[in-house]
Amino acid sequence: MSPKRRLLPAALLMSLTAPVAGLFVALSPVSAQAAVTADDQITAYTADATLTKDGQLQVKETVDLAPGGTTFSRTLSTRVRADADRDRTYDLKDVSATVNGQPAQGFQNQSVDDGRKLTLNVSGKSQIVYNYTVGNVVADSVDGREVSWPVVQGFGVSIPQAKLNISVPFATWVTCFAGRTGSSMPCTTSQLGESAELEIQQNGVPAAGRVTFLTGLSDQATVQPNAKYTTPWSLGRAFTVDSTTGGLAILIFGIGLLGAVGLWFFRGRDAAKVGHGAPERPVLDGADGPQFAAPDGIRPGQVGTVVDESADVVDITATLLDLAVRNYLTIVEQPRDSHFGKLDWELKRLHPGGPELLAYEKALLDAVFADGDAVLVSALGHSLRPRLNLVREQLYADVVTQGWFNNRPDAVRNRWTTAGVVLLGAGVVLTIVLAIVSKFALVGFAVMAAGLVLALVGQAAPARTARGAAVLGRVFGLQHYLANETSADLPEGSRLEFASRCLPYAAVLGLTEKWAQEIAATDDDDDPDEGIGWYSGPENWHLSNIGESLSNFVTSFGGSLSNARRLFG
């Protein structure tokens, strides 16, 4: 492939990027300097350069200047765009300057973004000579070794004519670009002279313009490639999607997904398959008539915790209703202050309870009645806040004591969630690091996704024992009965008691309204009712209203629990 054809893609790229590059030039320090020294005039420019055996280019530039002020500045860039993905960097050293044969006064060699700014003092017409050595100029390419460097650069004013003589041993061809940054315009003349001398001339170099030479080396050249490249950072590059980054990200996420699923399969599944079983008819026929009998003697709060592996608002509310039905307290609906007044209830403790109560039931009674044997629901929110955590602790401990879980469900979830959050955090850090130093930020995203999956899988990780799975199956049978059966087949005198005992279980299983209506159906007259022992209403209250009353009570009491944020927030 000829040098010209090989350079055509690069020239096209430079042409496409010229508008953006021009914007950076317009905003760069060089442009600002051009505005400051608009009266400067360069009347002549020559450059001599020699490639040494160790691959360094020694440059001498001679500039005839008619200054417009007392200082003169130029900037040598040490980073240029090599291709669509990379920048080429150069090593600039041993920089010096003379003015009219004497060391330059006030000479400053300052580091700026991707370059060096050279400033010196001038007075009247001056001849400035710059000397410096630039490294990393020899590059390896598909066509062999090449040498390049933008010799003319960084001047804030135009140059009428630039002449370059460059000695590159074993040079075989030469080409040259001139104009503003990004220009693909060939130089006025560029030829390979005798003794591998590159002879380049460019007429009319604009302010902030460049003259860049490129020459190839024959196989006889002993100088070794030393070019260095860097990849400029961009968000698009950091999150590059290709076969390598995408494949690695999928692999990492796949490993994380398999790991999370594997942990759940071996550690998070129930010890036995949960069967829905036949409907559980919670009726025990005795000498005194049919009595309610929950499967395995399970309590409403236990039902909710076994079903969803969480001690939450509805479990505590159902436990309170169950304690009321079992005559440990009464619920008294208060009269409204007005027709649209707020509903409230007074809870009255009947007796403290003994060893027949489970630990969490006793803890709930003590929490509700900590300030006395009578309390309004509306006043419970703040007073319950420091006490309900013990109820929750006791309920979780109870399901472990019963042998339904090997470990507390909340502790298991916390461990999995913590591990997932740690992995998610590590993924965030890895994403940031990889985005800064490489194109593999997607791999960090994959780690983040794996952490998120682990945390989500952990929510289903609390594993029931075989005994717990069997109990859950019977709970499903009870739910089927409560959802589809009624108390109509029981003797009329047993229906109110039976429906009341069913109500707390119905509440925890989302069937409050149905079984409240079962209670209401026992109201066989139009006369006001005093209550049913565990629940009573205000003056002129009817048992037929208990459906609405209980729905309001469950909502209000549950709201009081929700306000105790340490437990439910």
Image (tube, rainbow, N blue to C red):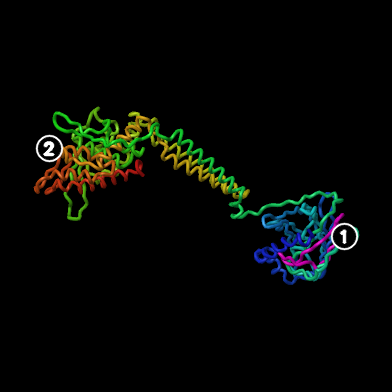
Residue, x 31% and y 42% (percent of image)? 313
Q: Which residues are magenta?
A: 162-187
Q: Nearer the viewer, residue 258 or 339?
A: 258
The residue tagged 1 is 197
Query: Dividing the image into 4 quarters, which one contains the C terminus?
Result: top left
| Main SS class of the magenta portion in the image | strand
Q: Is residue 167 magenta?
A: yes
Judge whether 336 appears above or below 482 on screen: below
- Nearer to us of marks 1 and 2 is 2
Quadrant in the rendering for residue 236:
bottom right
Q: Quote the CA–CA distance across marks 1 and 2.
A: 119 Å
Give whichever of discs 1 and 2 has the lower sequence position.
1
Q: Is residue 365 magenta?
A: no
Asked if residue 492 shows in the view, the reply is yes
Judge whether 493 appears above or below 236 on screen: above
Q: Nearer the viewer, residue 385 or 324?
A: 324
Q: Secondary structure at mark 1?
A: strand
The residue tagged 2 is 493
Image location (x, y in percent) of residue 350:
18, 35
Asked if residue 126 shows in the view, the reply is no
Circle 1: is it few (<14), some (14-19), or many (20+) Cα within 10 Å? many
Query: Dividing the image into 4 quarters, which one contains the N terminus?
Result: bottom right
Q: Secondary structure at mark 2?
A: helix
Judge whether 230 appears above or below 382 on screen: below
